[in-house]
Amino acid sequence: MRIRIFHFSLVMAGALLLAAFPVFAHHSFTAEFDVEKPVTFTGTVTGIDYYNPHVQVYLDVMAEDGTMEKWHLESGPPNQWQRGGLRKSMLSSGTMVKIRAYRAKDGTQNFAFLRDLTFLSGPQNGQHFELWIGGLDENGRPIYPGRKNE
């Protein structure tokens, strides 16, 4: 009987460790992105992965030299977007947006954390969405998702 309890305990401990593994894999913003390296650009949405733990947005961006760059933006989770009033369906392929983001610390080209976006085409043309939680904007005001800073 004791051996069964011991084996059951080992199985349960292993299951708990496996369940906790995703927590260990998660990273902080400051570990991967640099708030001192902001970037602003205009691009065309080519795709979106709207899944936990982070929404991923893909854009085509015309570089200064006239070449097309592929950008990958990471953002907060889908529920943060929803609280801010932004929906996946609003970012369909071909939508033009202005982006403010923070570049990756490791120097990965064209990879950044999405701070906010402004629609430049489509039904939401002109609408602005803050997706960044934490910190202060240029005017010293706290930043909250969904607040339309002007």
Image (cartoon, grey):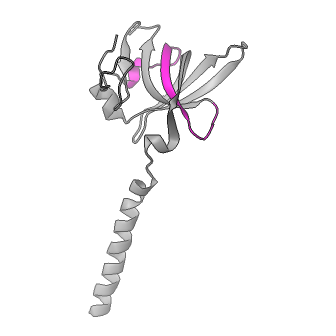
Residue pictured at 30% horizontal, 26% vertical:
144
Query: Which residue sits furthest front?
Result: 140
Residue pictured at 41% horizontal, 7% vertical:
125
**Is 82 left or right of 61, judged from the image as shown?**
left
Q: Which quadrant would residue 8 be assigned to in this image?
A: bottom left
Residue placed most toward the observer, 112 or 125: 112
Q: Pinpoint residue 98: horizontal percent, then vertical percent.
A: 49, 14
The answer to whether 9 is drawn above or below residue 121 in the figure is below
Q: Pinpoint residue 29: horizontal percent, then vertical percent.
A: 44, 40
Q: For the image shown, how many numbered marks are present on the structure?
A: 0
Residue pictured at 39% horizontal, 25% vertical:
88
**Is 37 left or right of 116, judged from the image as shown?**
right
Residue 107 lies in the magenta-colored region:
yes
Residue placed most toward the observer, 73 or 35: 35
Residue pictured at 44% horizontal, 8% vertical:
122
The answer to whether 104 is drawn above or below residue 115 in the figure is below
Residue 134 lies in the magenta-colored region:
no
Q: Pinpoint residue 49: horizontal percent, then vertical percent.
A: 47, 33
**Is 56 left or right of 16, judged from the image as shown?**
right
- Which quarter of the image is occupied by the C terminus? top left
The magenta region covers 88-109
The answer to whether 52 is drawn above or below residue 91 in the figure is below
Q: Which quadrant would residue 1 be assigned to in this image?
A: bottom left
Q: Pinpoint residue 71: horizontal percent, then vertical percent.
A: 59, 26
